[in-house]
Amino acid sequence: MFDSDLQAKGAPRTRRMFLASAATTLGGLALWSWKKSRTVEVAAAAGAPQEVTIVQFSDSGERLKMVHVTKVVKSEAEWRKQLSSNAFDITRHADTEIAFSGKYWDLHDKGIFRCICCDNALFSSETKFDSGTGWPSFWAPLAAENVTEIRDTAFGMVRTALACTQCDAHLGHVFDDGPEPTHLRYCMNSASLRFVPKSLNR
Ligand SMILES: [Zn+2]
């Protein structure tokens, strides 16, 4: 039920009074709408639950459906408890693992890579390639919706950082020197990912 319905029911019966009341109601509605939009902005700024759109995938890499989910928001202490210190530094504070030190740069098994923080499906072995950089590299994410590109100007460079759409975990960076067909190189940190081998899920 709308506010106008409530107000109309309680409005005086004469036509003149009704018109006056309607004008007031319209003015009130405009003010109410403005206040509401302001409230939404303030709530978002204060860290209220935010909805994001992602695509769900099965562990065997099958695209399931697009869903609207509440963004995963946790405190520093909660993330620290859940993650290894290395994964915490990388995903929550945009650190980078040392090249050739991670679990997945030289992994050639079939499967998918989920976010270490929230399990969002991020990459597939289908698009993984050997970049020679010492970091797991892909030429495309599983779904564009599941990752978010962020302009990164740290260390005096302009780069494109990549974050998990569902939880804002820092994943790595995207460069435009990748192979066919996209010519993109999604240079990821192993510590931001959790590999799910295909053979275990049949
Ligand atoms: Zn995530």
Image (cartoon, rainbow, N blue to C red):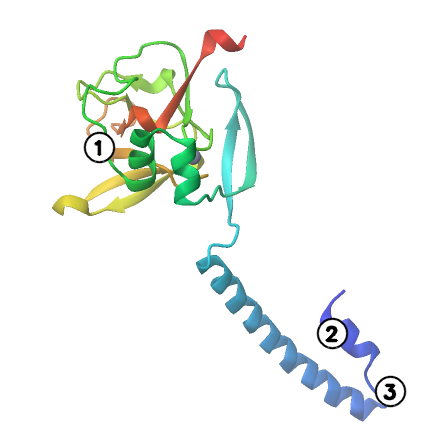
Quarter for ligand 1? top left
The quarter in which the C terminus is drawn is: top right
The residue that disc 1 covers is 176
Report how far apart the C-alphas of labels 2 and 1 lie in the structure: 54 Å
Give the percent coordinates (x, y) of residue 26: 66, 80
Determine whether the residue tagged by mark 2 lies in a helix, strand or loop.
helix
169 sits to left or right of 199: left
**Marking on residue 4:** 2
Instruction: Name the kind of residue labelled 3 in the image.
Output: Arg
Report how far apart the C-alphas of labels 2 and 3 lie in the structure: 15 Å
Q: Dot 3: few (<14), some (14–19), or many (≥20) neighbours within 10 Å?
A: few
**Marking on residue 13:** 3
Determine whether the residue tagged by mark 3 lies in a helix, strand or loop.
loop
Q: Dot 2: few (<14), some (14–19), or many (≥20) neighbours within 10 Å?
A: some
Report how far apart the C-alphas of labels 1 and 3 lie in the structure: 69 Å
Q: Dot 1: few (<14), some (14–19), or many (≥20) neighbours within 10 Å?
A: few
Mark 2 and ligand 1: say if the CB distance to the nearest ligand atom is below 8 Å: no
The reply to whether callout 2 and callout 1 are in contact (CB within 8 Å) is: no
Give the percent coordinates (x, y) of residue 19: 75, 87
Instruction: Name the kind of residue labelled 2 in the image.
Output: Ser
Q: Is tag 2's residue or tag 3's residue first in the polypeptide sequence? A: 2
Residue 11 position by quadrant: bottom right
Instruction: Name the kind of residue labelled 1 in the image.
Output: Asp
Please tell me which residue is depicted at 18% across the width and 23% down the height of the picture.
99
The quarter in which the N terminus is drawn is: bottom right
Please tell me which residue is depicted at 23% across the width and 25% down the height of the picture.
178
